Amino acid sequence: GAGVSQSPSNKVTEKGKDVELRCDPISGHTALYWYRQSLGQGLEFLIYFQGNSAPDKSGLPSDRFSAERTGGSVSTLTIQRTQQEDSAVYLCASSLAGTGVSSGGWGTEAFFGQGTRLTVV
Amino acid sequence: LAKTTQPISMDSYEGQEVNITCSHNNIATNDYITWYQQFPSQGPRFIIQGYKTKVTNEVASLFIPADRKSSTLSLPRVSLSDTAVYYCLVGGSGGYQKVTFGTGTKLQVIP
């Protein structure tokens, strides 16, 4: 694909329901990131996948949040028992590599999707 | 983790050069400096990245002094379409997962 694709673009859900957000990274990108952006705020890191390594989940705000990345490509962010404070735009990004300047890590551009706007009512 | 400080907002007239300065006093040896641009309802978009001295591309220039404790993004001759939020990031071997995008600088270009 031409870029990072996220679906759905908008999601309205009732408090207490579970939601799944999908991210299709750019083909060949080994690193994938999820961020959350509340209205008028900066981006908050949630979770990071790099190849077959164990994901860095240090940014997940609670155990209601989880993410998977199948086959090193598509990723799904799941939020269980949604709360109103979960309302935000969830952004996914991918890059060629995630860590290590020598491996082209940080020096590599991250490409972002358009995001999924989640509204919990 | 290197923390960045940048102005919350700036206004500029069309056609003028805009300089946005970012402070990162505790930048680490391996850290790069990267700037992203974000339009409303879109994900951030990479603008420019540098390690030291000056970097220029078709969109912007990035000036980094010798001590690397700050950096300045320079946008030449801005147009209304440059109205956006600009984020300054620093990071190195930790990768993007170790970086938090701050609130950025909201640039408003005035006709």
Image (spheres, helix red, strand yellow):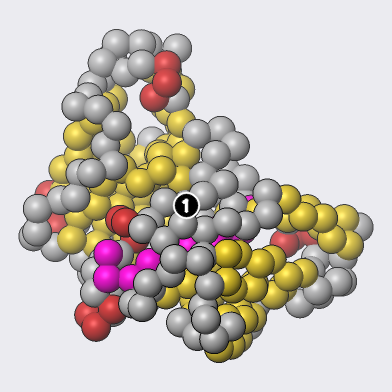
Task: Using the image as rendered, state which of residue B84 and residue A43 is in the foreground.
Answer: A43
Q: SS of the residue at dot 1?
A: loop
Q: Is residue B21 left or right of residue B55?
A: right
Query: How many other residues sit within 10 Å of disc 1, few (<14), some (14-19) or many (≥20)?
Result: many
Q: Is residue A20 left or right of residue A119?
A: left
Residue B91 magenta-highlighted: yes
The residue lying at 62 percent from left, 57 percent from top is: B6
Q: Quadrant of the C terminus of chain A?
A: top left
Magenta: main secondary structure: strand
The residue lying at 9 percent from left, 59 percent from top is: A53
For disc 1, the marked residue is B101
Q: Amino acid under label 1?
A: Phe
* Residue B18 position in % (x across, y down): 77, 69
Q: Quadrant of the N terminus of chain A?
A: bottom left
* Residue A47 position in % (x across, y down): 26, 46
Q: As displayed, is residue A9 above or below residue B93?
A: above
Q: As displayed, is residue A35 above or below residue A25?
A: above
Residue B76 appears in the rendering: yes
* Residue B21 position in % (x across, y down): 66, 67
Q: Is residue A79 left or right of residue B73?
A: left
Residue A113 appears in the rendering: no
Task: Using the image as rendered, state which of residue A44 and residue B53 is in the foreground.
Answer: B53
Q: Which residues are magenta?
A: B85-94
